[in-house]
Image (spheres, rainbow, N blue to C red):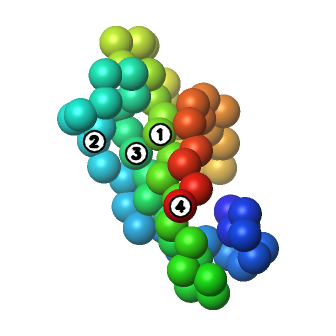
Amino acid sequence: MKCYNCGSELTWGGDHDCEDDEEHETVTNLSCPNCNAFILVYWGEKNTEKKTLNEGDFYDDFNYVYYC
């Protein structure tokens, strides 16, 4: 994924459970090594059927992207 600010490749910082978010199951944090942008992507609706993803599948259910 490219940085929204400078276009550099983002570094994946990890996926974490959203314990404080009532709507989303997971938050992914990404950062840019070039301009130090920090992005949080909230995804996966709680209380819905789990999807099985295979290698190469693309998540099409991102709900919120926060750009800091």
**What crowding class fits label 2: few (fewer than 14 Cα within 10 Å), some (14-19), or many (20 or more)?**
few
Q: Earlier in the sequence, mark 3 or mark 2?
A: 2
Q: Nearer the viewer, mark 4 or mark 3?
A: 4
Looking at the rendered structure, the secondary structure element under dot 3 is strand
Disc on res. 56: none
Q: Position of residue 54 (x, y in %)?
A: 56, 41
Number of other residues with Cα within 10 Å of mark 1, as a class: few under 14, some 14 to 19, many 20 or more: many
Could you tell whether 48 is left or right of 64 in the image?
left
Q: Residues within 10 Å of mark 4 (few under 14, many from 20)?
A: few
SS at mark 1 in the image: strand
The amino acid beneath tag 4 is Cys
Outermost residue on the right side: it is 7
Pointer 3 residue: 27
Q: Where is the N terminus found, in terms of image quarters?
A: bottom right
Q: Residue at x 58, y 56 (%)?
A: 67
Label 3 near label 4: C-beta < 8 Å? no
Say few, some or many: other residues with alpha carbon within 10 Å of mark 3 (under 14 / 14 to 19 / 20 or more): many
**Residue kind at label 1, given as amino acid type:** Tyr
Residue 27 lies left or right of residue 36; in this view the side is: left
Inter-mark Cα distance, 4 to 2: 20 Å
Q: Which residue is mark 2?
A: 17
In this rendered view, identify the residue nearer to me: 60 or 41: 41
- Marks 4,1: beta carbons within 8 A: no
| Three-letter amino acid code at the position of disc 3 | Val
Label 4 or label 2, whichever comes before in sequence order = 2
Q: CA distance from mark 1 to mark 3?
A: 4 Å
Say how many tags the image has. 4
According to the picture, the residue beneath numbered tag 4 turns out to be 68
**Closer to the N terminus: mark 4 or mark 3?**
3
